[in-house]
Amino acid sequence: MQQQKPPSDLPEEVKILTSETMSWMQEQREHFVSELTALVAIASASNNLIGLNTMATILCEKLRRIGMTTTMFEHPSGNAVLGEISGEHPEAAPILLLGHHDTVYAEGVSAPPIALEGEIFYGPGTIDMKAGLLQAIYALEGLLCKQQYRAFNKILFLSVPDEEVIERNHLQLLERVCQAKPFVLVLEGAKSPGNVVVRRKGCAYCQLRAQGIASHAGTSPEKGRSAVLEIAHQIVQFCRLNQSMEGLSINAAPLVGGTLPNIVPDFAEVTFEIRFRRWQDYHTLVAQWQELMQHQLVKGVTLTLTAEEHPMPPMEMSDESRVMAEKARLITSWLKVPYDPEVRGGGSDGGWTSTWGCPTLDGFGAVGAAAHSPKEHIVLEPVAQKTAMLAGMIAYLTM
């Protein structure tokens, strides 16, 4: 990877490319809204094979239209899409635009109706993250087709169908793409035009099971060993570690156990969601928990802890990603929007790319809010700014 130097001022070429993309994108609003409406109308929950593959096919078509070579990576649970194009600057590092085309709105989940109210565009998967995918394609079109930009090594566009679920089928594909150590720009949503996600928390799920001894709660309670009581004790112990390290959060839910009020429960189970800023914090926490589990309230109850095999890793900052963030700041200044760096609690595939040694920034999608809810939406006014910002970053990172 080409060593990136801390920037002092925005190069003139980046200013021109950014401004030209901004002006062109402002003219594309009606077309953008029409295309986004079509994408959002496709039900592409992580378990909706037809919808996922329809999205993948459409993305391939759009990428080919702007000159990219595309590959469809087929899988029984949904297809991934990789677009790539080579430029005329082989010494530069590759650029990866990373996204996903699955949503959380499975059957029975309340999804927002598609509606346009002034500058607010409501719809399932708008902010997370169909608008971000579309903005990226427009940014590439502005650079490659409208301005004939070729001063790059290689630009890659990867969208996977399984980011919203625990069971991942395309992580090996992402890892292979990351072997070239590209600069990664993740297309997750932003909270403001100048918002850039510089770090993200990792996320892990752990399940604690308790096996006790059942007995009649009235006639022989002393013969029982309450699994529910022991699980409750462990929840209190473990959740006391909340915020014991910066950025650490622990949530216990759901909790199940027992059968009837007149039976001492012989079984209980709880799931913990753990958010953490650094891998080291997670490993330290698990070690502390193993120690706490030795301090039981109900003797005779057997505890079994099962940790998620592949937790979502944190997106940590590196020296290279700090330089990337400074370049983003200079571009936002040129666009006359306040720079808004953020450490975000939710995970993304940017955690994987940073773990694999790729300098990564996130938040290059659309501006909006209320992801995963009936109020999910984007704001249309900043679309041109965020598209221009992404185009500027692509150009700047290849210099």
Image: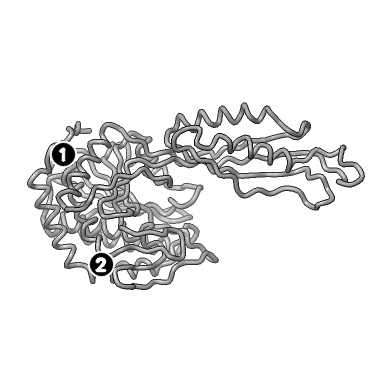
Residue occupying the far right of the picture: 219
> Which is more toward the observer, 77 or 399?
399
Q: Quadrant of the image for the N terminus?
A: top left
Residue 357 at x, y percent in the picture: 33, 33
Residue 391 at x, y percent in the picture: 19, 52
Where is 276 relative to 47, above or below?
above
Q: Assign a secondary structure to mark 1.
A: loop
Cα gap from disc 1 to disc 2, whole angstroms: 32 Å
> Which is more toward the observer, 201 or 84?
201
Q: Amino acid at mark 1?
A: Pro
Q: Which residue is mark 1?
A: 90
Q: Which residue is mark 2?
A: 32
Where is 35 relative to 366, above or below?
below
Give left or right: position of 35 versus 123: left
Within the image, what quadrant is residue 383 found in? bottom left
Give left or right: position of 287 versus 210: left
Q: Amino acid at mark 2?
A: Phe
Residue 220 at x, y percent in the picture: 90, 42
Q: Assign a secondary structure to mark 2.
A: helix
At x 37% / y 66%, what residue is drawn?
40
Viewer-nearest of discs 1 and 2: 2
Q: Are marks 1 and 2 in contact (CB under 8 Å)?
A: no
At x 17% / y 53%, what residue is drawn?
336
Choose the circle earlier in sequence order: 1 or 2. Answer: 2
